[in-house]
Amino acid sequence: MRVSWSGGTLTFRLDPEDEITGKASDGYPVKLRTNSCTISPATGGVPDDAHPDLFALAAWTVVAPWTRRRITFDRAVSAELARALHDGWGVEAGPVGVAARRTGSVLAISYSGGADSVAAATILPEAPFVHFRRVPHPRVPNRWTHYRSDVLAKLAGQTGRPLTEVASDLEFTLAEPRPGYPEHHAVAAGALLLADRLDLGGLAFGYELGSRWLGGDRYLLRYTPDNPMWAPHGPWGRAFAAAGVHIVLPVGGVSEAVTMRLALGSPLKDQLRWCLRGADGPCRTCGKCLYKELIQAAVERRPLDTPITADRPVARKWQQPPPYGGQEMIEYGCARVPGIEHTVFAKAAAFLQATEESTAWLDRCYPPALEEIPEPWREQVRSFMVAEVGLMSPEEARRVEEWGQARA
């Protein structure tokens, strides 16, 4: 793979051994559609004098799935970053010839406006936001026009927090499964290019307990301490650290029930939006709205409020036996929503037989997640969790560590 930058435009060319269809770090197959993308900060543009490792890592978040043996950058990178790419992915990276970037002092939040990132913002009330906004690609038709990135950006601008908006068409490098991030970390590409300007030493993401420790939607639905995407000792954690921008997961030890509760009680509640489709509010008809409604209803201890019926395609999987993606939260919701037996989750509830007692561990914080927070910000996150959430007991922590064993 050969990559080059011109301002904020990334162009890449495949080597003979590279592949059009590759796999992201979570094993999901992704197919390449085009060989360029642009990253455009709303103000100031991309600084030409950003450290070369920042340009290199931003490019790697885009091209990693299709790169097999080597990647050649248009400027020399540090030996530390080259080593991280080799150790993490087995690729030879170069040319090598600059000192490593100095780690900055500021922690920013990769802010989407969903419940998880709002919860992260609640824990870190002084942290500025970097918001990624999808825009169309000049050479790729937009067949996903219902994605209301304009609405999400407008809501982010209403938070009153220091905000850097970055627009990009990088999601259109994918032909399949649809426009989306080549790697989940590509949402950080703009923040990486601006890291020197913003003095970033860390970037906080809203990935929670399920995504960090329990496998998430695309894994084997089991305890995954070595999660390659988000473990600090994993390939991406080491690559970001080599570029002086540490990955920080302030809600990595708590469930979506906790992030929902924190978000609903946050000063940013009015800007909360997890739906990607709705203009004046959540669309209430997509699968994400249904899933989040289950969690919100469980947190608020009220009946489910949705127009979706069991015969809708978005509800089809809940009529089948488990396992389910995000199963811990389906169990949590089914155990707490009044009248669940009369909803689209009735069959799932019957299959799971979850109770409040069996899901109580999801109301507290998994302590090992706090040890993964980089030292400059660890105590702030720990103090918040102790005061506002509470830590899991050893017995509850074992529920995390034994997750999925029966399905292995």
Image (cartoon, rainbow, N blue to C red):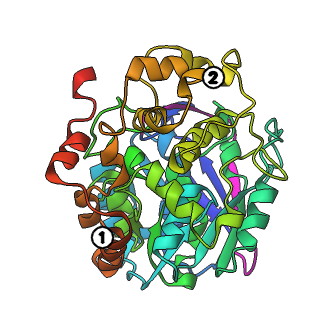
Q: Quadrant of residue 132?
A: bottom right
Relative to residue 138, is residue 117 depicted above or below? below
**Image x and y of residue 215, in percent:** 36, 38
Counting residues from the start of the chain, the first of labels 2 and 1 encountered is 2
What residue did someone put label 1 on? 386
Q: 210 or 177, which is in the foreground?
A: 210
Relative to residue 226, is residue 368 depicted above or below? below
* Residues shaded magenta: 26-45
> Which residue is rendered at x = 57% and y = 47% of the image?
296
> Which residue is rendered at x = 69% and y = 74% of the image?
159
Q: Secondary structure at mark 2?
A: helix
> Which residue is rendered at x = 67% and y = 47% of the image?
171
| Residue 315 badge | 2
Horizontal side, residue 275 vs residue 343: left or right: right
Q: Label 2 sits on what residue type?
A: Ala
**Image x and y of residue 7, in percent:** 69, 70
- Counting every numbered tag in the picture gives 2
